[in-house]
Image (tube, rainbow, N blue to C red):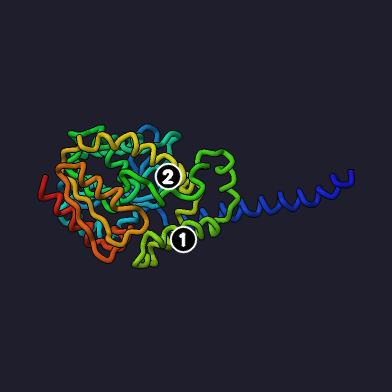
């Protein structure tokens, strides 16, 4: 009986701490979304709102970000430059940035949602631009809708082997316990783990300060952490299902990789993909790591222009 009496203050303290942590997390989320509000429009498909930014006119170019990430993976200046010649659509993928997250999400499901969104927006045969983990979405799109893709550009592609792209704790991604726990963990703690991971992606260069501020604010929200972990968990399975069919892709493909990417294996991914696709080219960017869209934005514009001339 004595132990029960002694436990009451401890339990009371834990409850107070939990309430305080949840309050702090909710406040941090509100502040983050107030400081970095949505900048684009929404399109709703299958009950899911997808947030996107669009500029320009002409042939459609669709930009897909990495994991973790958001449409800001492509700097505004890059979008403006592409928009001088093309119609650019940069999407927040489901659960990232300001896009909703459906219950069941795989690269194949995301490809279907993206296709439905593009149809609703009246976009026909876009050039798909995929960075890192979103390579799986572009591949799923091209394999499922082969006549609805004009060309593909891959940056730091993950197409065969996930390697270090699998985030810590990803195996617990669909745990209801983790979902509850994230509501009580202060974003600053989550941010420490994410940014250790992020800085490695930028090496040998460093991340842009404004980009880091937006990422610190929006990536650490529970919805985006959950989405990031779930996508990491599902990525290898999706690649294993699709890799035998890569040779069916017959549109022009440009594969761009940094020579200093120590985040994923270029030989296991970009080089192997080049060997499987008869209409592909491989471009190696010197003194560059994984985060090409941020660290070498001129390479994004250059690659899209190259593919644009081939379609």
The CA distance from mark 1 to mark 2 is 17 Å
Q: Of all residues shown, which one is farthest toward the right?
A: 1
| SS for dot 2 | helix
What residue is at 62 percent from the left and 54 percent from the top? 21
196 up-or-down from 150: above or below: below
**Whole-percent x, y for residue 105 in the image:** 41, 36
Question: In the figure, is residue 274 to the left or right of 68?
Answer: left
**Whole-percent x, y for residue 219 in the image:** 45, 53
Reading the image, the residue beneath label 2 is 232
The quadrant in which the N terminus is found is top right
**Whole-percent x, y for residue 207 in the image:** 37, 65
Q: Which of the marked residues, 1 or 2, is nearer the chain's N terminus? A: 1
Residue sitting nearer the eye, 270 or 298:
270
Q: How many marks?
A: 2
Specify whether residue 52 is in view. no
Instruction: State the image quarter where residue 17 is shown.
Output: bottom right
**Whole-percent x, y for residue 293 in the image:** 29, 58
| SS for dot 1 | helix
Instruction: State the image quarter where residue 46 is shown.
Output: top left
Residue sitting nearer the eye, 185 or 257:
257
What residue is at 50 percent from the left and 42 percent from the top? 171
What residue is at 24 percent from the left and 38 percent from the top? 246
Which label belongs to residue 106?
none
Residue density around tag 1, few if under 14, some if 14–19, many if 20 or more, within 10 Å: few
85 up-or-down from 246: above or below: below
What residue is at 36 percent from the left and 42 percent from the top? 50
Question: In the figure, is residue 115 to the left or right of 16?
Answer: left
Which label belongs to residue 196?
1
């Amino acid at each position: 009986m004595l132990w029960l009496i002694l436990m009451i203050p401890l339990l009371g303290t834990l409850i107070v701490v939990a309430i305080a942590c949840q309050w702090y997390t909710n406040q941090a989320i509100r502040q983050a979304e107030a400081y970095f509000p949505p900048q684009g429009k929404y399109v709703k498909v299958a009950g899911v709102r997808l947030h996107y930014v669009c500029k320009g006119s002409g042939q459609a170019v669709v930009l897909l970000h990495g994991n973790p990430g958001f449409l800001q993976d492509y700097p505004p200046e890059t979008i403006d430059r592409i928009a001088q010649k093309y119609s650019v659509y940069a999407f927040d993928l489901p659960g990232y940035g300001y896009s909703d997250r459906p219950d069941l999400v795989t690269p194949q499901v995301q490809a279907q949602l993206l296709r439905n969104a593009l149809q609703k927006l009246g976009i026909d045969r876009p050039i798909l631009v995929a960075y890192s983990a979103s390579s799986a979405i572009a591949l799923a799109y091209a394999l499922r809708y082969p006549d609805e893709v004009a060309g593909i550009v891959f940056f730091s592609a993950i197409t065969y082997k996930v390697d270090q792209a699998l985030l810590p704790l990803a195996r617990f991604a669909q745990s209801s316990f983790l979902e509850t726990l994230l509501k009580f963990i202060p974003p600053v703690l989550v941010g420490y783990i994410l940014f250790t991971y992020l800085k490695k992606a930028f090496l040998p260069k460093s991340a842009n300060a404004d980009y880091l501020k937006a990422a610190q604010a929006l990536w650490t929200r529970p919805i985006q952490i959950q989405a990031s972990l779930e996508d990491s968990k599902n990525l290898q399975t999706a690649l294993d299902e699709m890799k035998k069919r890569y040779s069916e892709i017959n549109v022009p493909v440009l594969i761009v990789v940094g020579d200093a990417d120590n985040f994923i294996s270029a030989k296991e991914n970009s080089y192997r993909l080049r060997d499987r696709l008869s209409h592909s080219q491989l471009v190696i960017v010197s003194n560059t790591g994984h985060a090409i869209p941020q660290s070498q934005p001129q390479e994004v514009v250059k690659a899209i222009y190259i593919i644009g001339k081939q379609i």
